[in-house]
Amino acid sequence: MNKALQRELKLFFLIPKNIYLPISIFGIIFVIFLVLDLDNSLNYASSFIASFITIFIISENSFKDDHNNGYLEQKLSEGGISDIFLYLLAKWITNVFFVFIPIAIISLIFQGHEISIELFGTYVIMLSTLYFFFNLGSAISLKRNNSLNALLIIPLLIPFIILVKGIFVDGQLEPNFWFLFAYFVFASSFIFYTILQVLRIQSR
């Protein structure tokens, strides 16, 4: 695990766009909504849309470079599924600390929410769930047009969007959180496993 995480951290910090791109995209989209001076009730929509697009864009090429340079194929031949599992886990951990947490803090501040541990954790769970779904689309689209990414995940995320609205707009954290958490568990288990198997097939 240490080697996989060290590699992802090096890739993140050695490639400048990995550092500035996610927050820049989020910031630009969010500022556009602020300039439009929409109703305060739409603060949730603006931050969610900005988060949604940001995670979508950074997930587009999650595996493309590693596939093109033969890294994924090498990992499968040397360590098999276990190495790919650690590879995916390291990618997620890196994004949690350097992308999702900053986005969650910025979003909650501009939504006017008091940054409680509950809301902060919920936002990170929301972003992580989006990340897993978008990565599934990215894995499937590895040898095809990346537009399949959006077509694949958007219908699956409709109930998810309703749950998130219930938490951040309607203020119904308690009943909706556990459904959102169940969505996260589904994404971090079944979707994660599906990504792993898809990458195995794509790297043959």
Image (tube, grey):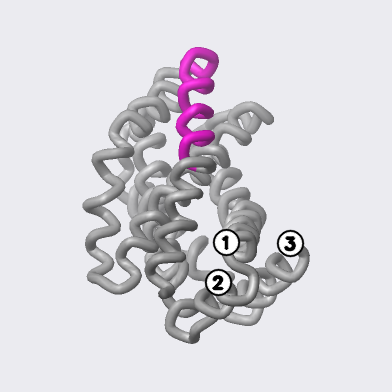
**Marked residue nearer the N-terminal end (2 or 1):** 2
Q: Is residue 112 above or below residue 59?
A: above
Q: Position of residue 6 (x, y in %)?
A: 73, 70
Range shown magenta: 172-187
Q: Which mark is residue 76?
A: 2
Mark 3 → mark 2, Cα distance in angstroms: 15 Å
Is residue 132 rendered magenta in the image?
no
Amino acid identity at mark 1: Ile
Residue at (43% x, 83% y) in the render: 68
| Mark 2–mark 1 CB contact (< 8 Å) | yes
Say which label, 3 or 2, has the lower sequence index.
Answer: 3
| Distance Cα–Cα, label 2 vs label 1 | 6 Å
> Can you identify the residue that label 3 sits on?
1
User: Measured along the vertical axis of the image, is residue 106 above or below residue 140?
Assistant: above
The answer to whether 134 appears left or right of 122 in the picture is left
Question: The residue tagged with tag 2: helix, strand or loop?
Answer: helix
Residue at disc 3, secondary structure: loop
Does label 3 or label 1 sit earlier along the sequence?
A: 3
Residue furthest right in the image = 2
Between marks 3 and 2 in the image, the one whose residue lies nearer the viewer: 2
User: Left or right: where does residue 32 sit relative to residue 55?
Assistant: left
Crowdedness near tag 2: few (<14), some (14–19) or many (≥20) residues, C-alpha within 10 Å:
some
- Callout 1: few (<14), some (14-19), or many (20+) C-alpha neighbours within 10 Å? some
Inter-mark Cα distance, 3 to 1? 13 Å
Q: Nearer the viewer, mark 3 or mark 1?
A: 1
Residue 64, image x, y percentages: 42, 75
Q: Which residue is mark 1?
A: 81
Image quadrant in which you'd find residue 201: bottom left
